[in-house]
Image (cartoon, coloured by chain):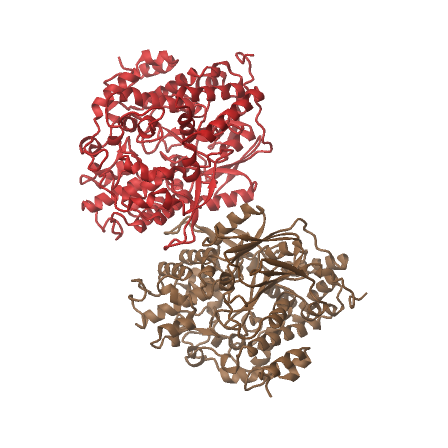
Chain colours: A red, B brown
Amino acid sequence: MSSTGSSKFYGYKGKILRLDLTNKKAVKMEPSPELVRNFISARGFGAKILWDEMKPGTDPLSPESKVVISWSPLTGTTAQSFHRVFVVFKSPLTGGYFRSVGGGFFAAEMKFAGYDGIIIEGRAEKPTYVWIHDDEVEFRDATHVWGMTIDGTTEFLRDETDKEARLLGIGPAGERLVRFACLVTDDYRTPGRGGGGAVWGAKNLKAIIVKASSREVELFNPDAFDKLVEEQTNVYMKSPLFESFNKFGTGGVTYNFYTLGHNPTYNFKQIELENIEVFKTEVQEKYIVKHTGCYGCKISCGKKWKLTKGPYAGYVWDFPEYETQWSFGSTCGVTNLEAILVANNICDRYGVDTISAGAAIAFAMELYEKGIITEKETDGLKLRWGDGDVVIELVRKIALREGIGNILAEGTKRAAEIIGRGAEKYAMHAKALELPAYDPRAAKAHGLSYATSNIGGSHMIGWNHYEILGVPKKVDPFTTEGKGELAKRVQDFIAGYESAGFCAFGGLVTVGYYNDEDKMFELISGLLYAATGIEEFKNPKYLWLVGERIYNLERAFNAREGFTRKDDWVPERIQKVPVPRPPAKGQIFELDKLLDDYYKARGWDIKTGIPTRRKLEEIGLKQVADELEKLGKLPS
Amino acid sequence: MSSTGSSKFYGYKGKILRLDLTNKKAVKMEPSPELVRNFISARGFGAKILWDEMKPGTDPLSPESKVVISWSPLTGTTAQSFHRVFVVFKSPLTGGYFRSVGGGFFAAEMKFAGYDGIIIEGRAEKPTYVWIHDDEVEFRDATHVWGMTIDGTTEFLRDETDKEARLLGIGPAGERLVRFACLVTDDYRTPGRGGGGAVWGAKNLKAIIVKASSREVELFNPDAFDKLVEEQTNVYMKSPLFESFNKFGTGGVTYNFYTLGHNPTYNFKQIELENIEVFKTEVQEKYIVKHTGCYGCKISCGKKWKLTKGPYAGYVWDFPEYETQWSFGSTCGVTNLEAILVANNICDRYGVDTISAGAAIAFAMELYEKGIITEKETDGLKLRWGDGDVVIELVRKIALREGIGNILAEGTKRAAEIIGRGAEKYAMHAKALELPAYDPRAAKAHGLSYATSNIGGSHMIGWNHYEILGVPKKVDPFTTEGKGELAKRVQDFIAGYESAGFCAFGGLVTVGYYNDEDKMFELISGLLYAATGIEEFKNPKYLWLVGERIYNLERAFNAREGFTRKDDWVPERIQKVPVPRPPAKGQIFELDKLLDDYYKARGWDIKTGIPTRRKLEEIGLKQVADELEKLGKLPS
């Protein structure tokens, strides 16, 4: 049986919903067979549609800016970890391509309602929310919920629609155009990074809320599908990486990663952090009162923490992820778990990326330490390292753009430019995206992904399981040898499984079981084929190709916007200052050497870091090469 | 048709549920015909059962202490405003009888589940919640929710029982035995005063959560009942007092009451409050984003406020009632509506009585002003009048018994004793219950109810509609003339309609329409008879008798505990310092004169303020007289 030429793509019975906010028009379109076959779904859809529809030079906060939201043909099925929501847009923080991923139940509900994706465009005249009930799509006034945090917004909009509806929305930070404001689901599984919340805010879009009548997803070959899901479940249960995610979530690694040279302290100064032991799992587990998961996922990586001591006793909230334990913890010198949870709570409710917020606060703390800013600029706050209450107050100020928070809300790169006086030396970002909880000096391929990532300093674009976890095999994290190829491999691997809408934690659990990436792709390919009947997906190698295709297309998007090799950069501290603590003691990040190696592995032009025609044609992106050439951006 | 002798009380098909926490035993009992006929329900049940079952001298925080929770035979019916939850117990604040009333949906759900009341006794070995699903009653471990605020507790316990279950529970303040910790419903309609939360906390009882399968209440004469409900609805719609409650809730009166000499400023110093205009309805209405009501009530006096400016922008929460606008506002010199809402939010979530909390803070602010306490005692906080942030921080400290909050959590009377140095002069309470938002000097009969109330300084026991609203007729609030009789009349009137579980706001709306209390009793009696078929209830005069009976029984309870005339008291400032601002300028509260007049009107002994045998026998409480006599408490 072949789907070629057929108009019926089994797993794509849904429509792509185009929401034109300017004209309050909702148009439903079939995803084209070409889009589906070449980009599969999720991140693939986002990259391709954004490339096709968004003119270079568009201001991310203008009505012309677009947001693509999509998921997978496997979303809403019994398969594990394919229920995530991919948000692709041009970032108001980086000025480049962005992909941000969240979890929860929103994607599954949208799939049940009959959709495979959403394109948001235009700008509503006044605050608006969109209510989707199966085929019906309504643009509704959101003036009454504008200004509300996510909890209040969810409560109000569920009252007006359906008590069990699922929501994706923004908080006050998005409305106030905080450049790293995020989108938040009703259950706080945020597509966190890059400022998607500000893009919605600029469009006067408060929320999309959806309820489907059915819970069904039609499959091409249900029996084959069920068998593969059984195998997948078996893999999860037997994976050596399952238990830690399941018991502790990502918080399970906080202390261990510190001992690997990550969890970088004090704005990447990397001095030893006293009292780091509070992050050990035996301490964290005392806080856990509930395990929560996204739609139908056995990993249940979410934990609810209960605080019973200190000034915040009484709080119960989603635990801070490893990244957040770092961003409001180690990098600010804070070891007060209660304060970290409360800062996380504010971010969730106000819609702020915890990583960028914490990084911006660590940056401000270092400026205060150096005397570059004083209490005059901080509304009297003493920005001392390790003060959890100051962190909480600064998060609030950032979310509401109040005082010093109004500057930090611009992101560290812009904040440094505004402050001047040498502040940029302490702004720890790549392409204006704040660096997260791993030290590039302590894992060179992972760090190379910070530098080369199309979305800036992200840990998710090239999370290096070889260097950090030693799966499928251990690679020396400190050597520069072979790291160009390794960074490329992992970036394409991730883009590959993200084209199927798969979750990174599902990825780690699976590759940790097989110790073989190809085996994992075989499983995903099998699921994709059993669900859709599309021949191309049958071939497990195809995911590698689609991954590389997506990665190159994203690169081309940035090239079209003017990004070149000079933007593949990490801060001076990372490049020149040796790490002072073991095990990475003495390490620096050899940027230029690593970049040369990487571009070579990628088949990109070494001078500009832009894909060559040859590479683009090889992976089916001839038209992209043509357009870059027309714009004078294609390397000669 | 007569119910006499019949075992079937139509409106009392439900059982009284005895929850023995010590032995995890739930026993269901028929309410006895005698109890029903003599005390009807609600406050009547509470007063009678507490009198019968609680030995004098019992420590309210001991296992021997009991709590009676009850509602009305009209609860869950289509009749308006009979769906409140009455909580009766011995108060850890006053050491005397207490009745506290909340709203929401808990009582209706309990009624649907088949119950007319609950008696709580004993002490659970460890944190416990009770799950009631129709006939099934389960004692369950609550260790995981112990320490959580009400929002988290509700979310967790609904997840474990039923998503639509209704809850009555305590927050961290009740667990920490704050003497004015309250009970809170899932929708924050708190039975607020007197420390019921601490009584539950001492019993290790975190919550009662209930879901009924049916929504039916059987009626004696459905047709007659429906007609009366139609009349009641008509009354509501036409009442001149309906609109203000409906549009603004009790916040509609804040500014007006200030101009009447209430809304007493600065801990009853009653200096003019600058910026009082912020409490006008035209300012308040800008905050309102939703109207909410208790089960089936058209008044919808609840409002949700949204904050969009200042440091708390993003909050959406139940608006602060008039009392709370006063307690965190005028009496602390605060005119920051945002801060008042946030303080209210903390009280709701942590389970703290807003009136006592605000009054305790005003007391502390005056001690700080007078230099009786300094920053040494306040953990460095400057307790300056008018500082909303300080109010918020103190509420938090009280709820968690932290620093100065640990002292204030004892209530102003005990706090003054602990602090010494003349602090008691500034403790504005009656019988240790903090005085609320009316100045006794500006309404003498109302003030007389503060002094004589069996539960201490409560505005709800004798809210004087004659003096304050001029309904059913205007009475000069400043004269002492006839105020003994007037205070008695209003106290009995309220106890009368509270024996039927009716709401005070329903009472005001109704009496405001009829301009006649007897007409209102006629309506309620009609509803009671149509619902239950109990002959006695047919007679509208009967409610006056039951009201007086309840009031005297409550008095007898206190007499048995050792209360006498000396406890019918208001602070020196009220008795001796003339009000400095118009319209009550120059007024003091003539305590002794008013008390003499009141006891005479009550037929009580003037020396002791205790009911005489003659009075007790006249109202059907001979056995009460006998017991008081046995204990040597009956006036000779």
Report the residue at 56% width, 84% height from top.
B597
| Quadrant of the rendering where the N terminus of chain A is positioned | top right
Can residue A608 be seen at all in this image of the molecule? no
Report the residue at 24% width, 45% height from top.
A365
Left-right relation of A610 to B555: left
**How many marks do you count on the picture?**
0
Q: Nearer the viewer, residue A500 or A296?
A: A296
Decide: is B535 above or below B484.
above
Instruction: Tell me where residue B233 appears, x and y as whole percent.
Output: 67, 58
Instruction: Tell me where residue A180 appears, x and y as whole percent.
Output: 35, 37
Q: Farthest residue toward the right?
A: B1
Instruction: Tell me where residue A284 appears, x and y as whole percent.
Output: 38, 45
Q: Nearer the viewer, residue B152 or B264?
A: B152
Decide: is B268 above or below A519.
below
Left-right relation of B590 to B78: left
| Quadrant of the rendering where the C terminus of chain A is positioned | top left
Instruction: Tell me where residue A522 appears, x and y as whole percent.
Output: 45, 19
Q: Quadrant of residue A443?
A: top left
Decide: is A631 above or below A394.
above
Decide: is B12 above or below A459.
below
Q: Nearer the viewer, residue A412 or B214?
A: B214
Can residue A36 be seen at all in this image of the molecule? yes
